[in-house]
Image: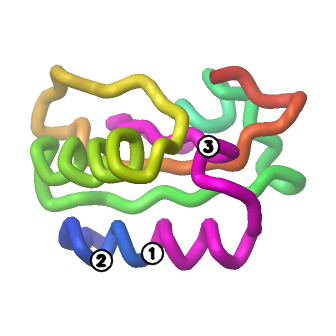
Amino acid sequence: MVFSVQQIKYEILAYIKECGGEFGDYYVGIAADPKRTLFDVHKVDKDADPWLYKQALTFYAAQTVQDYFLRRLKADGEPVYNGDEDTDCVYVYKKSERTVP
């Protein structure tokens, strides 16, 4: 399912509120394959760590969401400046001693 910028912002904000912690406790990224990125790259534990991803309408929409969380709310993450039309998923996870930024 594809979501708008506002829908994704709301979903992530609600998820962070539900899971607890500060925005800096969370990593927000963009990927074409968010499950692979979450579990293989960042080493998120599927069952133990809080994580979420949402598909945006476009890469630019995903960038807009990521920018909001990184610049305005001071979440952790590496800004993604380049991506193709498939790079449209915004993901978030709560950092832990297991995860790799």
- Could you tell me which residue is drawn at 63 percent across and 23 percent down? 101
Q: Amino acid at mark 1?
A: Glu
Q: CA distance from mark 3 to mark 1?
A: 17 Å
Q: Amino acid at mark 3?
A: Gly
Q: Which mark is residue 24?
A: 3
Give coordinates of residue 89: x percent, y percent: 34, 49
Q: Which mark is residue 72?
A: none
Give coordinates of residue 61: x percent, y percent: 15, 53
- Is residue 68 or residue 34 the one in the foreground? 68
State if disc 1 and disc 3 touch (CB < 8 Å).
Answer: no
Give coordinates of residue 56: x percent, y percent: 23, 59
Local crowd at mark 1 within 10 Å, few (<14), some, or many (≥20)?
some
Is 34 positioned to the left or the right of 96 in the image?
left
Q: Is residue 22 above or below residue 45?
A: below
- Is residue 3 or residue 70 the one in the foreground? 70
| Residue at disc 3, secondary structure | helix
State if disc 2 and disc 1 touch (CB < 8 Å).
Answer: yes
Give the color scheme: rainbow, by chain, secondary structure or one colour.
rainbow
- Could you tell me which residue is drawn at 48 percent across and 57 percent down? 53
- Could you tell me which residue is drawn at 57 percent across and 59 percent down? 52
Q: Which residues are magenta?
A: 11-35
The residue at which mark 1 appears reads as: 11
The residue at which mark 2 appears reads as: 7
Local crowd at mark 2 within 10 Å, few (<14), some, or many (≥20)?
some
Q: Amino acid at mark 2?
A: Gln
Give coordinates of residue 45: x percent, y percent: 82, 42
